[in-house]
Amino acid sequence: MSVVDRPAPGREIRERFGFLRRSYAMLIKEFIQLRRDRVSFAMIVMLPVMQLMLFGYAINTTPHHLPSAVLLQEDSDLTRSILKALENTAYFRFLYEVHDVDDFDNLLKSGKVLFGVEIPRGFERAVRRGDRPALLVAADATDPVAASAALGSLGMVVQTALKHDLFIGDPPEMPFEIRAHARYNPAAASSLNIVPGLVGTILTMTMLIFTALSVTREVERGTMESLLSMPIKPVEVMFGKIVPYVLVGFVQAFLIIGIGVGLFGVPVLGNLILLALLSTLFITTNLSIGYTISTVVQNQLQAMQMSMMFFLPSILLSGFMFPFAGMPTWAQYLGECLPLTHYLRIVRAIMLKGATMENLRFDALALGVLMLLAMTIAVTRFRRTLD
Amino acid sequence: MSNGNGIAIDVKGLTKSFGGREVVHDLSMQVKRGSIYGFLGPNGSGKTTTIRILCGLLTPDSGEGTCLGYDIRRDAEKIKRQVGYMTQRFSLYQDLSVRENLEFVARLYGLADARGAARDMITRLGLSGREEQLAGELSGGWKQRLALGACTLPNPQLLLLDEPTAGVDPKARRDFWNEIHALAADGLTVLVSTHYMDEAERCHEIAYIAYGHLLAHGTVEEVIAKSALTTYTVTGEDLNGLAAALTGKPGVDMVAPFGTSLHVSGRDVAALEDSIAPWRAKGGLHWQKSQPSLEDVFIELMGRSKDNFQ
């Protein structure tokens, strides 16, 4: 037993094809590990399917049925048929009918509508007299992509639609003028749209990852075991882990907005303090979601993957890359569940439109609800024991 | 309440399973206040699980009991305030300095003067001059000292130490044990798990656990006496050959080499003596009947429990 002269059959070491043998050994090991890591395995399937679904079904770069409002200062058959014609183009969907200029402005400012059609007093009479009065179409151009297609087609479609009406003879000549006004971003500069959007996107990415790794890191390094044996409550752990990054996020937001204003000439029309407050809310919401991820996953790799799973729809469905109004209803509902959607509205409205808290109540509330939801899940998911 | 009568840990019938595998089976134990209680047993025997149940990190599937007079199921939070738990794996923050780690613990337990407490502990540990060194950069021995310091910082009444000296050199181990004895002299109760026999012999009481079952407990002398093991120490030539020949013979429960000698042990004295008789008649070997060592007892217990529970 002590002296082994010759290895048993199958136990001798083969020198040939050593490269292939060793590579094969490594390959087998990797496959086994991959199969054990359920979450990674699921991601391999989920990520492409999710991307395909979102790009294929949810995203539409020439949006239709854009939410619109009409400022009606005169109610007549003519104005009715013009509105009908506009709606028939399928570009517009009239959600609000207001009679007051302030209401009209607030609807645009709060982002509830992207378009507003203003029909001035005495419009019909002016048309009949042949005065060619102006029909004012105001577009929210903070997202130039969403507005431009609808604006471009405006003249043509209204003309064709009205052809059947008695007001237009043959050869067709427009009895009134359509005056389009791209509000908030008259030059349709995409930097005005993208810089505020980037504030939200960058914050989402960094904040999510910071906290998503925080609990798993403690588990992986073994420090969680002694932390759990000490008298600290889950809520206390959470606050302790979130608060430092609120500051980090704040610095980051300050940096991006500063560069945006300094280098790209993006205006900040609204109140800076309101922007700072709501940005803090958004930062905290993302940190809470990251922290929730951290309490669900088992290791840091899974935490990164899960963060990606959250980040991807955030970019695609929030209105950052593609017009929110152009997405189908289900995708819009999905988008409403993402904090970035609400923050984009907030940051664009404050910076470009000079919106006030009054205009942004809904989105601020939505962020608050999402934050509390994430925190509740995190605290209940956080395991006080090692069971 | 067992709080007043000098019992620190009093548990009955603890059972814990993971994924259908029972790791701790019907375990009952009592630890006196101010004593050092050694917890011994092979790897995977349930020592760590038991310690985690005691400090509230795991909830037992069944069984009950008190730790420092608090119910281990209901009062986990209260127990945590009074217990220092030193994990098997170094579990302080490697990327924090010695001082920062100690201050973190002190603040977490709500010590009024966290900085002062940390400073005093650094002096006590003999880490002065190294307080700004990262914990991860300390040597194994110093890491253990620091971990013990962190456990004792909030003045606990009970210390649970899970293999605190694994991988530490003999000098550091001795210092560590001197510290533990000093703490126990101050009235602290210490439950310590270990693989080292010399450490077991430094405990006031020991318990031996294997495959989740508590097999023996008491003082070292009691455990050896209760084993009813007879041991012969053999010296001479070709002990390897002798070991191979004796293994499995009736009455021979254990054959184990100890340096230049061989320990042959068995519970049934008559059968053992019958089996070794032919070898004793032969020359070249010196046979001496001796008291079994604690290690003999444990290895024999381990071998027996393997047959029973595996």
Image: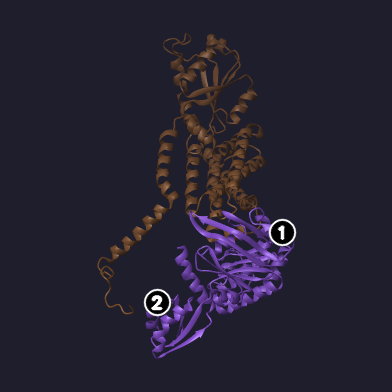
Measure the alpha-carbon separation of dots 2 and 1: 51 Å
Rendering colour (chain A):
brown
Circle 1 residue: B1
A215 vs A30, left or right, is right
Rendered view: A265 above or below B234: above
Identify the residue at the far bottom of this view: B283
In the picture provided, is B30 more to the left or to the right than A325? right
Figure colour scheme: by chain
The tint chain B carries is purple
- Chain letter of the residue beneath label 2 in the structure image: B
* Mark identifier at residue A280: none
- Label 1 crowd bin: few (<14), some (14–19), many (20+), radius 10 Å: few
Residue B133 vertical position relative to residue B262 in the rendered view, above or below: above
Q: Which mark is residue B249?
A: 2
The three-letter amino acid code for the residue at tag 1 is Met
**Image quarter hosting the C terminus of chain B:** bottom left
Callout 2: few (<14), some (14-19), or many (20+) C-alpha neighbours within 10 Å? some
